[in-house]
Amino acid sequence: MPELPEVETIVKGLRENILGKKVQKAEIRYGNIFRDCSGKIFSEDNLKKAIKNIEGQRIIAVRRRGKYIIFELDDFSLIVHLRMTGKFSSEPAILKDKHTHVIFFFGEDDFLAYNDVRKFGTIQVIACEEEFEKTTASRLGPEPLGDEFTLEYLLQELKQTKKNIKAFLLTQEKIAGIGNIYADEILFYAGVNPLRPGNTISAEEGEKLYHGIKEKLLLGIEAGGASIRNYVNEKGEKGKFQDLIQVYGRKGCCCPKCGAEFITKTVAGRTSTFCPQCQK
DNA sequence: ACTGATCCCTGCCAGC
DNA sequence: TGCTGGCAGGGATCAG
């Protein structure tokens, strides 16, 4: 599942690969991947128009915002969310894959394919600033690795919420880019129980969380992301963060700090793995 | 303000 | 072996 570090890795690769290229043709095999600014599936006519708009456009920038990938074209933007299983690939074999839903051709043998086993991912077509304002991507909280995300901000937000800390970390409007894997790792690092309400987190714990967020995400980026299940970057390469994971998906394993067995509980609708001893 | 359920979708795995 | 049912999972959305 691509979270911030995985998406960052993908974006770096895309920049090397497709910047400056012109979309000659877009082949659509499953049109429901495409969405308008509010996330709604296009009608057949509107999809045709949207595709026509994309064709002939040059890719002038590729950026990441939270877990979103933003392609800036000459006159449009594409906002992509990979959700669980979405990926980009330029490998020739992907053309024959049954889960390849969209192919942007830059030339006869030069292309970028969007492949998504579960079809949860979306590609929003944005025509102008007003449309961007309607997207969820425009309502994201600060980038956790950017200057806006300060310790003061985190402590202030925690003080104001009764939401449990796990749910808080996953709230993209508060902090952009953290998903289930990194949330579990961050909470373990900080020694905080996922069920703790935000407003019960002490300043000291808040500081640990703050450093945990920075540290785990940076580590994830350095490792080229985590390859759990089927994540690979656009070159088909796996990341290395899965080898550095301490708690996520390790139910029944022993905590490296205290030796207790990790347990799981559904928190914020997600399976959360944590140490019942260390995480208070 | 927050929680919980539902939906989207398919691979995978346990159980029969 | 082959089928089936349930689960996983990010995030939007809606009901409570």
Image (cartoon, coloured by chain):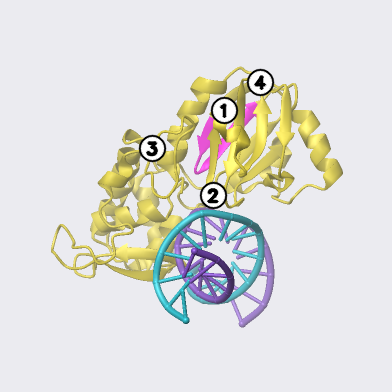
Chain colours: A yellow, B cyan, C purple
Residue type (three-letter) at the residue carrying disc 1: Pro
Tell me which numbered mark, 2 or 4, is placed earlier along the sequence: 2
Residue type (three-letter) at the residue carrying disc 4: Phe
* CA distance separating discs 4 and 1: 14 Å
Tag shown at residue A238: 3
Residue type (three-letter) at the residue carrying disc 2: Arg
Tell me which numbered mark, 3 or 4, is placed earlier along the sequence: 4
Q: Is residue A67 visible?
A: yes
Tag shown at residue A83: 2
Q: Which residue is mark 4?
A: A106
Tag shown at residue A92: 1
Tell me which numbered mark, 4 or 1, is placed earlier along the sequence: 1
Mark 3 or mark 2, which is nearer to you? 3
Q: Nearer the viewer, residue A166 or A235?
A: A235
Tell me which numbered mark, 3 or 1, is placed earlier along the sequence: 1
- In magenta, the rendered stretch is A63-72
* CA distance separating discs 3 and 4: 25 Å
Whether residues under marks 3 and 4 lie with C-beta atoms below 8 angstroms apart, the answer is no
* CA distance separating discs 3 and 1: 18 Å
Mark 2 or mark 4, which is nearer to you? 4
Which chain hosts label 3?
A
